[in-house]
Image (cartoon, rainbow, N blue to C red):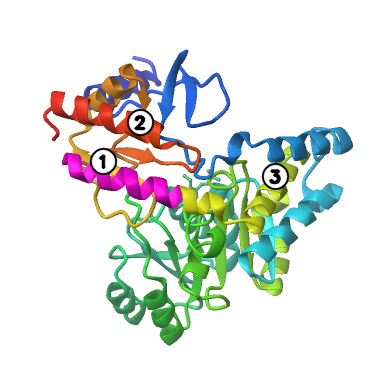
């Protein structure tokens, strides 16, 4: 017996349960169609909501920055100085979100690790929605604060928890749009509870920006709650089509994060090309809401047609379209058969979603044409019938 034998037996067990993740290889740019495992397929699973990942304007900005500034930022921003581009993206995001300032970080995942431990520590309490994203959960754990989970999207449950748990400082954190179900957090109710109990408020808007609010300004804008949420976490990797993360809030909070957020202090910032492309993406959204409108038109059409076919698309209020199957082996089989029909729609099982809630998560984009969506619907109908799902 070797000390690492557990790995192969665990992998075999994952395979048996239909939970072994099959990572396909993409050899073309992101787009409504792309090449996965050397096959041209309809792309129904990327977070590239607005089709910006291969946009000419973003690519031109990245090329220019590459020529002007080179490929790497040199070192951690607090140690080797910050590039003008990093300051420019922070200003552009603050203007877009209607916040005083932002801190730009390496990813949305990292942003949660950066912000939460900078706000609370071992003497404090965090109230966390039970379905929060893994990056929020890990950020909470890193802080060392006591973590109290409240029932999903339930401000009453949050209120009860806030009454029961005292601490030096207290913070509530929630996803804005829940990434696996597409439902929206009741931010107005959460803000009210937070005000009554003096809780610091943090919302992760990863799936809200570029999607909700005026011209995709996100969930706080959607509910008209500007200035009433302390911190908005965001990502540049989804609707903005690039990579990176940030936290938006008051100038004072951002000054604090720049002194205390560990991924900012101990990890190098993103490359000039990434940052310049991100700035261009923010400008595209600032200039027009056309892509956001197209995204919603496409998503509404696809979701309604899937329901008409008899698929269970859950409780989604956003373009995220879960196709709930339940059994992980069946979900995985559905995904495989779709792929052989020319449609890439990944199955997702435990631990990303609860056991028994396996699904295919369809991500519609503004870049899909009506013919693309009809192609996907036809294949879902065919394979769904073959497998007895509808
Ligand atoms: N927060 C939420 C709610 C997310 O869905 C994701 C992406 N899966 C992230 C954070 C992480 O974002 P990134 O991919 O930029 O690290």
Q: What residue span does the magenta drawing correspond to?
A: 295-312
Q: Is residue 20 left or right of residue 113?
A: left
How many residues crowd around disc 3 within 10 Å: few (fewer than 14), some, or many (20 or more)? some
| Residues at circles 1 and 2 in contact by the CB criterion of under 8 Å | yes
Which label's residue is closer to the chain start, 2 or 3? 3
- Residue behind mark 1: 323
Q: CA distance from mark 1 to mark 2?
A: 10 Å
Seen at 39% across and 81% down, the residue is: 193
Q: Which numbered mark, 1 or 3, is in the foreground of this view?
A: 1
Is 298 magenta? The answer is: yes
Q: Is residue 176 left or right of residue 280?
A: left
- Residue behind mark 2: 345
SS class of the residue under badge 2? loop
Residue 39: which disc? none
Relative to 247, does residue 314 appear above or below in the rendering?
above
How many residues crowd around disc 1 within 10 Å: few (fewer than 14), some, or many (20 or more)? many
Q: Quadrant of residue 268?
A: top right
């Amino acid at each position: 017996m070797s000390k690492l034998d557990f790995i192969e037996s665990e992998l075999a067990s994952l395979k048996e349960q239909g939970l072994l993740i099959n990572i396909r290889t993409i050899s073309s740019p992101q787009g409504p169609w792309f090449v996965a495992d050397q096959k041209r397929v309809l792309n129904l699973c990327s977070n590239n909501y607005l089709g910006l990942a291969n946009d000419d304007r973003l690519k031109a900005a990245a090329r220019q920055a590459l020529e002007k500034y080179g490929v790497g930022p040199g070192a951690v921003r607090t140690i080797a100085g910050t590039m003008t581009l990093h300051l420019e993206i922070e200003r552009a995001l603050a203007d877009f979100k209607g916040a005083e300032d932002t801190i730009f970080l390496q990813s949305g995942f990292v942003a949660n690790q950066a912000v939460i431990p900078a706000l609370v520590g071992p003497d404090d309490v965090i109230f966390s929605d039970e379905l929060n994203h893994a990056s929020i959960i890990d950020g909470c754990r890193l802080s060392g604060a006591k973590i109290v989970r409240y029932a999903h999207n339930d401000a009453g449950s949050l209120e009860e928890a806030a009454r029961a748990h005292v601490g030096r400082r207290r913070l509530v954190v929630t996803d804005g749009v829940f990434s696996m179900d597409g439902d929206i957090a009741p931010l107005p109710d959460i803000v009210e509870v937070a005000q009554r109990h003096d809780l610091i408020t943090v919302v992760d808007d990863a799936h809200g920006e570029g999607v909700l609010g005026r011209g995709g300004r996100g969930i706080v804008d959607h509910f008209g709650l500007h200035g009433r949420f302390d911190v908005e976490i965001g990502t540049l990797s989804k609707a903005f089509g690039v990579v990176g993360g940030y936290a938006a809030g008051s100038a004072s909070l951002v000054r604090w994060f720049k002194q205390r957020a560990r991924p900012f202090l101990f990890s190098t910032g993103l490359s000039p090309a990434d940052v310049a492309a991100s700035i261009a993406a923010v400008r595209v959204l600032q200039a027009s809401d056309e892509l956001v409108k197209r995204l919603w038109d496409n998503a509404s059409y696809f979701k309604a047609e899937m329901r008409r076919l008899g698929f269970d698309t859950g409780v989604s209020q956003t373009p995220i379209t879960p196709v709930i199957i339940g059994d992980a082996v069946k979900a995985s089989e559905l995904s495989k058969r779709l792929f052989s029909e020319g449609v890439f729609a990944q199955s997702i099982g435990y631990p990303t979603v609860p056991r028994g809630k396996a699904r295919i998560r369809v991500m519609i984009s503004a870049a899909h044409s009506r013919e693309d969506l009809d192609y996907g619907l036809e294949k879902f109908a065919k394979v769904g019938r073959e497998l007895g799902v509808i």
